[in-house]
Amino acid sequence: MWKPVLKAGLAVFWLGLSSLLASAQTDLFPTVQPFPTYGAPSILIINQEALFSETALGQDILALEQHEQEVLIAEGRRIGAAFEAEEKDLTLQRDTLPPDEFRRLADAFDEKVVAARREQETNDATLIANIEARRRTFFKAVVPILAALMQRYSAAAIVDQRSVLLFDRNLDITSEAIDLLDRAYADDPGMLESLGQEND
């Protein structure tokens, strides 16, 4: 029996922090608000994963992608059930049809299954490509906000938290960036649609 396969997984590589370093940096650098006054930092830290998953825009993107995956899975199951029924019907005809006629029908059925599987694999690949494209366009949309934060704190760079082993948590602007993006998205709900259009 043919069963559709959804390739929903994406290869994501993370640079992990050990529990020792995590506890050490918490003890060494207790969070202080507002931003420290000892001087403008040259580097700011951000958690890209949190920036995506904890913002309203990122959560809406995740909900949209979940819906797209569910639609694809449901379609695959529908096609699979239809093929299963057709296969059973064809099996029942085996003893009532001439061998040549049965072979012709069986070959045609196999061709339909192969074509459907290829189409499903194409749809899977398209879904994955769209997910990756939305991630890229999401972070492009965040660039002006991050640039404004760099200017506010006279910073020379913003570094992803995953690439840093030890840092002063006072340099982490993730919460501030999330708040600014949420405000921007509230003012312009069409941001989600514009991200989708770039993937068409």
Image (cartoon, rainbow, N blue to C red):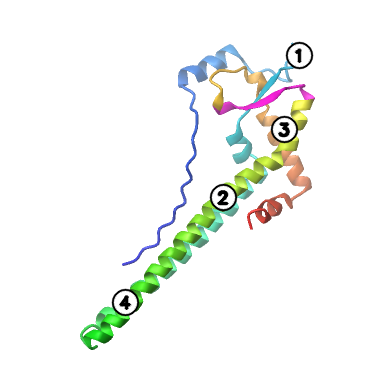
| Three-letter amino acid code at the position of disc 1 | Thr
Sequence-wise first label, 1 or 4: 1
| Three-letter amino acid code at the position of disc 2 | Ile
User: Can you see residue 89?
Assistant: no
Q: Position of residue 18 (x, y in %)?
A: 46, 22
- Queried whether the magenta region covers residue 83, the answer comes back as no
User: Can you see residue 113?
Assistant: yes
Which residue has dot 2 on it? 131
Foreground mark, 3 or 1, reads 3
| Three-letter amino acid code at the position of disc 3 | Leu
- Which residue range is magenta in the image? 152-162
Which residue has dot 4 on it? 107
| Alpha carbon distance from label 3 to label 4 | 58 Å
Sequence-wise first label, 4 or 2: 4
Residue at image coords 55%, 57%: 67
- How many neighbours does mark 2 have within 10 angstroms: few (below 14), some (14-19), or many (20 or more)? many
Which residue has dot 1 on it? 37
Q: Quadrant of residue 107?
A: bottom left
Residue at image coords 74%, 52%: 190
Which residue has dot 3 on it? 146
Sequence-wise first label, 3 or 1: 1
